[in-house]
Image (tube, rainbow, N blue to C red):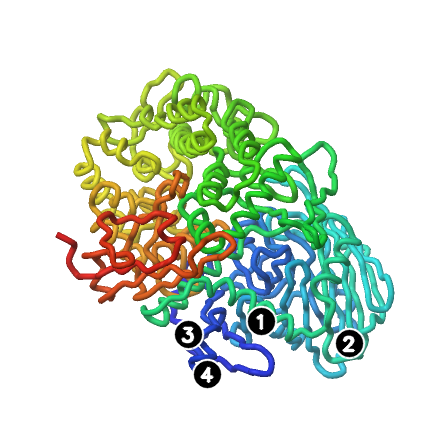
């Protein structure tokens, strides 16, 4: 049950000599001069958002953007869902370094040894803690372990965890290396630790297989201390280790460099990224890196809570999907029969041209990171495309959810296609386009990734692609048997049709005329699962017969993580064609508006899985902003000739579902590695791409920004403009409608703007009103 409470407001105690720390319960900024506060956007982030409903990769604190290390305390160590840092748990079970899509590892715990407790410490070392002593800001986490009275401080570089433990005076100090344990989605086994000298250790552990990641992954780590090691003891029962420091220095500093390739590269990662022992310097550098990325979007107006929530959303958009390559470009390649260490291409200075990444699926990315990264962080999108192509060069297939150097085949379809095509259409990726096209095309044909259902590792049947190609739809149920997960034919048909359309746009760009026509024809397959009599998308069996006793509000009956009412609107590439099936744009808008009116009663979301268990009606919600399949729907109205309804419903969704700061709520559903955080940012600045930015000159739909002014800093390497500004005049919670739009003193008649218009810089002025434009 969710806690009904209001967080007490505390003051931030700031030491200008060191770093700015944010209390986990703080709602007000500190009393510094405005010119000093202005650039400290990192202090607006509220890391505890929605942490009562956590997930192994959800929470981030002592980490860098997209870093290999994601160091934070664990209060729950078992389970992908509910694992990691969960606000309602009051016991620290260790500080681990990897909280990632199907990866985990290297959990440590500082302890004090008193009398006979030493022989039990390997199995009895957890400690209570209080949020009252906790301080969190992006790049830093501090708390007091009540049992030992140890102040534990964490920070990191990209690949190195940096620990600072302040022990009580005259205590027998030690750090437990809990190498053989369950951490989130993984069983950590075969942990080893070896003393190299009085200041250094080396070790490794193996993350066992699971149904998502069927190949084991080894984590290598190099440990360095500033305090000399007194002794290292191994427990025969657990296989874990206790590193003792005696009664030496009160403060113990520890560096932990990790690598997925070798001990040598773990050491190189420390050498390259953290050659010093200045903990406060590392914290400051982390804050600076976060500030620079958060500062790409500056906002004015709204409440203090609105602004804090915005930067928290933006922080989420930049904290998922971690790198797995070392500082020298070595990376784990698990795509073949045997594990190999790959090497990324190097530039003239001997540095990797890009990083290799782990990543949850790009399922839903067309409405989230495609737009946000492509506009504000183009270098990240560029890098990810090269990473995906590296997987193709190694394993012969562009993945949709790689983990530990190999695909997990999470979710369905070829979800990387819109992401890569969007990067090309925006001019971020310009080289080897023909090779990229052929790689993408392979995924859309038999024996490609589109033919695989979720987690279908060894066959290509569950995707039903042969039926899609022969009959124009994927049947439900699939007659060939059960292969993998998410075998929901109606949803698969809709996904494939959209993804085919995006590939067709690239085919057109490269003058593959026959391919363009072929994939455009396939993109119309969505029509084959629309039942005009019922007015909904509806599953068909292999004989083309509609599913009997069909309830469009029943969850996951032919639809992936959704119901028929939600997924009916999953035609982002052809809203006009969908409207024609419904009897025209006016009738389509009326239908969708009715769905929104019903969804509003449930705050536009099916909530968490716990909510759905307590309230089955949540799963029958007609529009769900708590998961990806229908998060585009408020902008569908723009394309149906009703921009006023886009403005009205988007503002209401933000207000009801994505506002406020609390551990008990935040995303009200599934925040998949920054996808919902990205969505929130886009809704709040009033820009959205319906087809994922995959057409020739990508178009952005204009919504209703909640801020008076939004300034987007454009990356000069990619875009000609310096800044793009959205100014909403007379904006307030009542004035949600746009009556007039101008750009560079020129009237904008449509509620849309092109990518080239934005990236050339300038100002978009919106005149807001409490009444729709007549």
- Residue position marked by numbered label 4 in the rendering: 32
Q: Secondary structure at mark 2?
A: strand
Residue 456 on image: x %, y %: 56, 31
The residue lying at 37 percent from left, 66 percent from top is 299
Q: Residues within 10 Å of mark 1 (few under 14, many from 20)?
A: some
In this rendering, which labeled residue sits more in front, label 2 or label 3? 3
Q: Nearer the viewer, residue 190 or 37?
A: 37
Q: Nearer the viewer, mark 3 or mark 4?
A: 4
Disc 1 from disc 4: Cα separation: 30 Å
Report the residue marked by disc 3. 27
Please provide percent x and percent y for residue 302: 32, 68
Proximity of marks 2 and 3: CB atoms separated by less than 8 Å: no
Check disc 4 and report its element: helix, strand or loop. Answer: loop
| Quadrant in the picture for residue 503 | top left
Quadrant in the picture for residue 402: top right
What is the C-alpha distance between the residues marked 2 and 3?
Answer: 38 Å
């Amino acid at each position: 049950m969710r806690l009904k409470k209001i967080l007490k407001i505390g003051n931030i105690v700031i030491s200008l000599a060191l770093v700015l720390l944010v209390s986990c319960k703080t709602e007000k900024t500190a009393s510094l001069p405005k010119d000093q506060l202005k650039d400290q956007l990192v202090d607006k982030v509220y890391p505890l958002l929605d942490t009562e409903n956590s997930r192994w990769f959800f929470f981030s604190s002592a980490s860098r953007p997209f870093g290999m290390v994601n160091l934070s305390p664990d209060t729950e160590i078992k389970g992908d869902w509910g694992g990691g840092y969960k606000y309602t748990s009051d016991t620290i079970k260790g500080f681990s370094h990897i909280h990632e899509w199907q990866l985990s590892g290297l959990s440590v715990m500082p302890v004090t040894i008193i009398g006979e407790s030493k022989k039990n410490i390997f199995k009895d070392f957890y400690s209570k803690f209080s949020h009252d002593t906790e301080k969190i800001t992006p790049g830093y986490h501090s708390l007091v372990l009540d049992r030992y009275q140890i102040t534990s401080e964490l920070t990191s570089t990209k690949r190195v965890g940096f620990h600072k433990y302040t022990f009580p005076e005259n205590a027998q100090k030690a750090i437990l290396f809990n190498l053989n344990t369950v951490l989130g989605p993984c069983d950590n086994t075969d942990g080893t630790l070896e003393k190299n000298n009085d200041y250094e250790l080396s070790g490794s552990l193996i993350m066992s297989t699971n149904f998502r990641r069927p190949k084991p992954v080894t984590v290598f780590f190099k440990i360095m201390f500033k305090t000399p090691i007194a002794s290292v003891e191994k427990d025969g029962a657990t296989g874990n280790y206790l590193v003792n420091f005696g009664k030496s220095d009160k403060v113990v500093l520890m560096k932990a460099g990790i690598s997925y390739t070798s001990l040598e590269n773990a050491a190189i990662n420390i050498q390259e990224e953290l050659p010093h022992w200045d903990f406060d310097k590392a914290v400051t550098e982390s804050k600076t890196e976060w500030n620079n990325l958060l500062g790409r979007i500056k906002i004015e107006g709204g409440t203090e809570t609105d602004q804090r929530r915005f930067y928290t959303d933006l922080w989420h958009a930049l904290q998922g999907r971690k790198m797995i390559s070392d500082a020298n470009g070595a990376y784990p390649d698990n795509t073949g029969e045997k594990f190999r260490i790959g090497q990324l291409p190097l530039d003239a200075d001997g540095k990797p041209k890009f990083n290799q990444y782990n990543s949850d699926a790009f399922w839903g990315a067309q409405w989230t990171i495609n737009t946000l990264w492509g506009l504000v962080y183009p270098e990240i999108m560029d890098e990810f495309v090269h990473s995906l192509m590296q997987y193709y060069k190694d394993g012969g297939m562009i993945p949709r959810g790689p983990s530990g150097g190999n695909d997990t085949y999470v979710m369905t379809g070829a979800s990387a296609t819109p992401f890569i095509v969007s990067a090309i259409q925006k001019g971020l990726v310009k080289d080897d386009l023909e090779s990229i096209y052929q790689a993408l095309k392979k995924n859309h044909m038999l024996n490609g990734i589109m033919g695989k259902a979720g987690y279908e590792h060894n066959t290509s049947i569950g995707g039903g692609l042969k039926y899609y190609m022969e009959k124009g739809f994927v049947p439900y149920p699939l007659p060939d048997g059960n292969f993998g997960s998410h075998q929901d034919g109606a949803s698969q048909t809709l996904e494939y049709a959209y993804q085919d359309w995006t590939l067709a746009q690239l085919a057109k760009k490269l003058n593959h005329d026959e391919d363009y026509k072929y994939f455009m024809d396939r993109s119309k397959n969505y029509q084959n699962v629309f039942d005009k009599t019922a007015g909904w998308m509806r599953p068909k069996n292999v004989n083309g017969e509609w599913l009997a006793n069909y309830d469009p509000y029943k969850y996951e009956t032919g639809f992936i993580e959704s119901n028929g009412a939600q997924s009916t609107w999953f035609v982002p590439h052809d809203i006009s064609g969908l409207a024609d099936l419904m009897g025209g744009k006016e009738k389509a808008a009326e239908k969708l508006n009715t769905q929104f009116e019903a969804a509003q009663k449930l705050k536009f979301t099916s909530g968490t899985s716990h909510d759905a268990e307590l309230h089955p009606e949540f799963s029958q919600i007609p529009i769900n902003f708590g998961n990806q399949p229908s998060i585009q729907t408020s902008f569908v109205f723009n394309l149906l000739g009703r921009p006023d309804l886009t403005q009205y419903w988007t503002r209401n969704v933000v207000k009801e579902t994505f506002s406020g700061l609390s551990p008990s709520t935040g995303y009200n559903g599934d925040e998949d590695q920054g996808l919902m955080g990205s969505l929130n940012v886009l809704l709040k600045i009033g820009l959205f791409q319906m087809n994922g930015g995959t057409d020739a000159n990508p178009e952005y739909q204009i919504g209703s920004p909640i801020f008076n002014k939004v300034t987007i800093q454009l990356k000069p390497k990619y875009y000609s403009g310096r800044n793009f500004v959205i100014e909403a005049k007379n904006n307030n919670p009542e004035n949600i409608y746009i009556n007039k739009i101008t750009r560079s003193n020129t009237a904008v008649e449509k509620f849309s703007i092109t990518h080239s218009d934005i990236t050339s810089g300038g100002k978009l002025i919106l005149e807001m009103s409490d009444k729709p434009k007549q």
